[in-house]
Amino acid sequence: MRADLILLCFAYVLSQFFRSFLAVLTQVLKTDIGATPEDLAFASGLWFLIFAAMQIPVGAALDRIGPRLTSSALLLIGGGGGALLFSFATTPAHINVAMALIGIGCSPVLMASYYIFARSYPAAQFATLAALMLGVGSVGNLVASYPMAWAAEAIGWRMSLVALAAFSAVTAIGLGLMVKDPPKVEHDEKGSVLDLLKMPALWLLFPLMFVNYMPAAGIRGLWIGPYLGDVFAMTTGQIGTATLVMGLAMIGGTLVYGPSDRIFGTRKWVIVVGNTLVALSCFALAWFIESGPVTAIALMAAVGFCGASFPVIIAHARSFFPPHLTGRGVTLLNLFGIGGVGVMQPLSGKLHGAMADSAPVLAYQTLFVLFGLLTLVGVAIYLFSQDRTD
């Protein structure tokens, strides 16, 4: 791994942190500024929606100006500026604006590294390299669990966000100095994301990509805190430990998925089996909703582990991309993956809010069943896709 890719990996640590740290701050933000779980669900969804919407311009920027300027400029302005704004928040509306800015800042980081992998390394290694970047970068999930809970209690959540703003700015400057752009593709063809949307093979992958990240991101990034707090009366520190367990499971799953397509000689069936297990774990979580915190955490960890097929799905889709549309291709898939979470987070907040007062346990059961059903629908459509390896 080159030095610039290691720095991109650290930037992705920050991206993973920002998409999941709200779950740990559920109680303290409610106390300090009156932010309800539904408010945080909306803010989290806004991060994912803005992040997803940015994939179209980010894809064009990667193909036209390269990953160095794309990643450094956006992370500096969005990541650093958004985190600093969050530290001054006094209302849920301020959190919404801050999370939108942070979503802009984080939007190019993973795709910049994927673009370099796709352009500078053998095609057969893409899934392994993509999973390695995703797995190591998912350390941000861990930092967003117990360490964030500890920092919030030790120095306060506001000073913690100021520190994160500084880390983001320094990292962005480093990216601008160190990232090496791959040579530009010489071609006479003009292309856009519309050319990719005309490919029938990709349309059988889009639905599963849309729902694949929903259960893990929804539970780990948002609902694990309210669920464990409401049903089992767990404290912020205990919730931090639970999110740490799920975060470790997500990292483990990513690293296991990485070389799986080369080990088994198939991408399609690795993805089908993994996502079917995600759906079954969600159904089990709903069925054993009050069986105890150990059972609940174990099942949520299973969702995180089995739901880490994101890089393998992108590798499957990448095998259909023409070289001059690599940047647009990987970001288009990321748009579907992140956009699905962005749509589901606020909807799940509204669904929970409509049921929480009269039937709090049923509200969480409904969410988990919904996650499972949507995953199964994605798998059913994906079954008709063409398996392809490099």
Image (cartoon, rainbow, N blue to C red):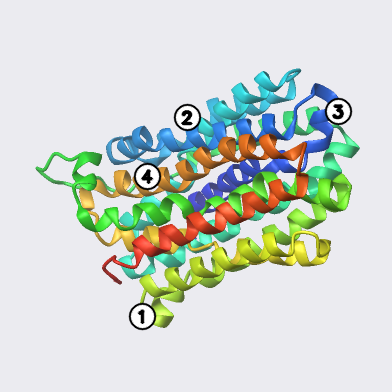
Circles 1 and 2: CB distance less than 8 Å?
Answer: no
Observer-side mark, 4 or 2, equals 4
Residue 78: horizontal and vertical position, in percent?
55, 27
Query: Of the residues under marks 1 and 2, which one precedes in the sequence?
Result: 2
Q: Which of 307 and 181 is in front in this view?
A: 307
Residue pointed to by mark 4: 331
Instruction: Tell me the SS state at disc 2.
Output: helix
Residue pointed to by mark 1: 265
CA separation in Å, label 1 and label 4: 25 Å
Q: What residue type is labelled 4?
A: Thr
Query: Of the residues under marks 1 and 4, which one precedes in the sequence?
Result: 1
Residue pointed to by mark 3: 31
Q: What residue type is labelled 3?
A: Thr
Quadrant for residue 261, please give it.
bottom left
Quadrant where the C terminus sits is: bottom left
Instruction: Tell me the SS state at disc 4.
Output: helix
Query: Of the residues under marks 4 and 3, which one precedes in the sequence?
Result: 3
Residue 62: horizontal and vertical position, in percent?
34, 40
Quadrant for residue 85, please give it.
top right
Which residue sits at x=22%, y=53%?
A: 323
Which residue sits at x=52%, y=47%?
A: 8
CA separation in Å, label 4 and label 2: 17 Å
Q: Which amino acid does label 1 sit on?
A: Gly
CA separation in Å, label 3 and label 1: 52 Å
Observer-side mark, 3 or 1, equals 3
Position of 368 compared to 233: left or right? Answer: left
Residue pointed to by mark 2: 73
Which residue sits at x=83%, y=63%?
A: 292
Q: Which amino acid does label 2 sit on?
A: Ala
Q: Which of 86 and 53 is in front in this view?
A: 53
Residue 123: horizontal and vertical position, in percent?
31, 65
